[in-house]
Amino acid sequence: MTTDATPEAPDAPPPLVPLHCLLRAEAGPPRQAALPTGTPVWVLTRHADVRQALAHPDLGRASLYAPDAPPTVLTPNILDDPSSILNSDGPDHQAIRRTVQRAFTPRAIERWRPWVDGVVRELVDGLVASGSPAEVVGALTKPLPVRVISRLMELEGLDTERLGYWSDHALSTTAYSAEEIRTAIAEFGAFGHRLVQERRKNPGEDLVSSLVLAADRTGGMTEEQITSLTIGLVIAGHETTMTSFGNALVYLLDPERAAQAEQAAQAERVWQRIGADPAAAAAATEQILRTVPLGDRTTAPGQLRRATADLEIGGVTIPAGAIVAADTAAANADPQVYPPGPVDLFAPLGTPSLTFGAGPHHCLGAWLARMELELGLHHLARALPELRLATPVDRIEWRTGLLTRSPLRLEVAW
C-alpha cells in the first residue's frame, strides 16, 4: 500500500503478501505445466492424487539425478545433493532412514517435551522483560529451534550466525549466485565431516553420535551420506520451525485475516484461547501447518518426483521419465477433504495434512517441529494475551530468494 508519507518508486515491486494470503492452485485433475528450467511437469493438486504420488514406488527422487534426467533447478541447493537421504529411494532410502528414525518417533520426541517447554518459557520471559515493542524473530522464533537442535546434536557453542549463513545459501533459489551457494555448501559439508569424525572418536549420547555409530555398525552408509544426513538434520532441525513459527504469528495476529474471515470480534479470543488451553494450541498448530505453506512456490509448483515406469494418477497416465510436482499447498486446501471458507483453528483434522509429506519421504522431524510450534504459541499467548503486530502487514520485512519464506523481522507490541 502506498501512502503520501512513504511513496513507492514507480518501478518498485509490489510488497510481498503473507503466505496465508497467497492464491493457491485449485484442486483439480493433473495438468501439464513447465518448471522455470523449461522442463515439462505434471502438476498434482488434489489431496488424493498428491498423497498417492508421494507414496508411489514408481515415483522417486533418485531418478531426478540420473544421467538422462532433465534439469529441474536453475541454481544448486542442498536439497539437490544426490547423496542426501532425500534423494534416495527404495531399500537404499530405508537403510539410511533406519539409522536415525528412532530418535524422531513421537514417543522419543515426547521425552524432550519438559526440556523444550523450559526453553520456550525462558525465551518468552526474556521477550517480556525486554518490554514493548519488541522484535520477536531474534528473541524467540529463531533462537528456539537453534537451541533445541543444538542440544539434540550437542552443538552448544555453534556459531549461530554462521549456521544462518550456511542455511540461507543451502536453501537459496535466487538470493545468491551458483558459485556462492557451492562455496557455502562446501564449507558446511566440511563442518559436517569434521563433526562426524569427532563423534566417531569421542561418541556421546547425542544424535550425531547415535547416527555415526549406527551407520558404522550396519555399514549401509558411505561417509558422504553420513555427512550429508548430519548437515541436513542441522538445517531441517531449525529452518522448518523458525519459518512456521514466524508465519504463524503473522497469520494469527493479522487483523485483516480476521476481518476477512468475519472473525474480527473473535480474533483476540482466539489468541487468548491458545494461551489458556494447551489442547487448543495443539489443535491450532495442526490447522496452521495445514493452512500456511512454508514457501511461495516461486521455483517449483510442488515436491518433485520422476516416474520410473508408466503409472496412472487421477485418471491420467504419467509416462516413465516424466517429472511430477506434488502441490501439497493446494492439496491441503482441497475442498473435497477440508471445509472451504474461514478456518476453524480448533477443529480437529479429519484427514492428516500433507505439509510434512507422505510415504517413505515423510519428514523425520515432523513431531519435533509440531512440539516446538505448539509450545511456542501456547506460552507466548499465555504470557502476552494482548499481543499484536506493531508493524502493518504490508511493511513486514521478509527473508526472500530462498526455498522457504518467513519474516526477517517482526515487530510486536502489547
Image (cartoon, rainbow, N blue to C red):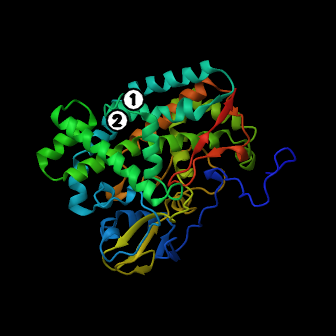
Q: Residue at x 71, y 58 (%)?
A: 13
Classify mark 1: residues with Cα within 10 Å, few (<14), some (14-19) or many (20+).
some
Q: Give the residue at x 30% y 46%.
A: 190
- Which residue appears at 37% of the width and 81% of the height? 319
Numbered mark located on residue 109 in the image: 2
Circle 1: residue type: Arg
Residue denoted by label 1:
113
Q: Are discs 2 and 1 less than 8 Å apart at CB?
A: yes
Q: Is residue 348 left or right of residue 317?
A: right
Of residues 94 and 225, the one nearer the viewer is: 225
**Residue 362: horizontal and vertical position, in percent?**
36, 53
Gap between marks 2 and 1 measured at Cα: 7 Å
Determine the secondary structure under disc 2.
Answer: helix
- Assign the C terminus to one quadrant of the image: top right
Q: Position of residue 14 (x, y in %)?
A: 72, 57
Image quarter for residue 111? top left
Q: Check disc 2 and give the amino acid type.
A: Ile
